[in-house]
Image (cartoon, rainbow, N blue to C red):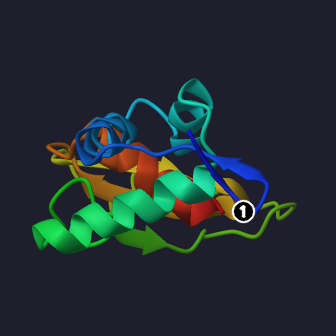
């Protein structure tokens, strides 16, 4: 530990920083969890992540390759409270999954979509 201007500061070797950064990139944990585990502030860990990504020539804050999923968002056929009922068969295809989101919006995606990607997409659209 180093004392600078009356304040104690820890020195983290590069190898330790890199190990903590790699731990924080696991999709099953949050940066805050990792920071707490190592008695760091989350801001410090985000700073280390950015530094290592730039050094390694990687795109900042992206743990998986970018990709697009074909998505179709359809407006509801009837307004909530209306006596009309939307047709369940209208536009339905056997090779797609259709999800009705809050507000009656429908999300239609290929059945081959990765479930994790679908969950992130639905969460983003409902936000």
Q: Position of residue 9 (x, y in %)?
A: 62, 48
Query: Residue at (33%, 34%) from the top-left corner?
Result: 23
Q: Which residue is mark 1?
A: 103
Depth order, front residue of 108/93: 108
Residue 56, above or below 1: below
Q: How many marks?
A: 1
Secondary structure found at label 1:
helix
Point out the image quarter for the C terminus: bottom right
Q: Name the residue at 87% across, 60% down.
A: 81
Give the residue at the far right of this rendering: 81
Q: Is residue 39 above or below residue 18?
A: above
Front residue of 5/32: it is 5
Is 85 on the left-hand or right-hand side of 57? right
Q: Is residue 70 visible?
A: no
Q: Position of residue 42 (x, y in %)?
A: 60, 50
The quadrant in which the N terminus is found is top right
Q: Position of residue 17 (x, y in %)?
A: 34, 44
Indicate the quadrant where residue 119 lies: top left
Residue closest to the far top = 37
Residue nearest the observer in this picture, 56 or 74: 56
Question: Left or right: where does residue 31 sit relative to residue 70?
Answer: right
Q: Residues within 10 Å of mark 1 (few under 14, many from 20)?
A: few
Q: Residue at x 56, y 74 (%)?
A: 75
Give the residue drawn at x 69%, y 56%: 102
Q: x%, y% of residue 99? A: 47, 49
Any part of residue 11 in sight: yes
């Amino acid at each position: 530990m180093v004392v600078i201007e009356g304040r104690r500061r820890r020195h983290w070797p590069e190898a330790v920083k890199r190990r903590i950064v790699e731990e924080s990139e696991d999709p099953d944990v949050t940066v805050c969890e990792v920071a707490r585990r190592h008695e760091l502030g989350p801001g410090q860990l985000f700073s280390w992540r950015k530094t290592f990504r730039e050094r390694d020539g990687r795109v900042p804050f992206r743990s998986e390759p970018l990709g697009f999923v074909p998505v179709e968002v359809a407006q509801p056929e009837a307004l909530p409270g209306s006596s009309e009922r939307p047709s369940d068969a209208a536009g339905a295809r056997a090779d797609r999954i259709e999800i009705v989101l809050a507000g009656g919006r429908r999300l239609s995606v290929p059945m081959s979509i990765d479930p994790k990607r679908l969950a992130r997409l639905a969460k983003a659209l409902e936000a």
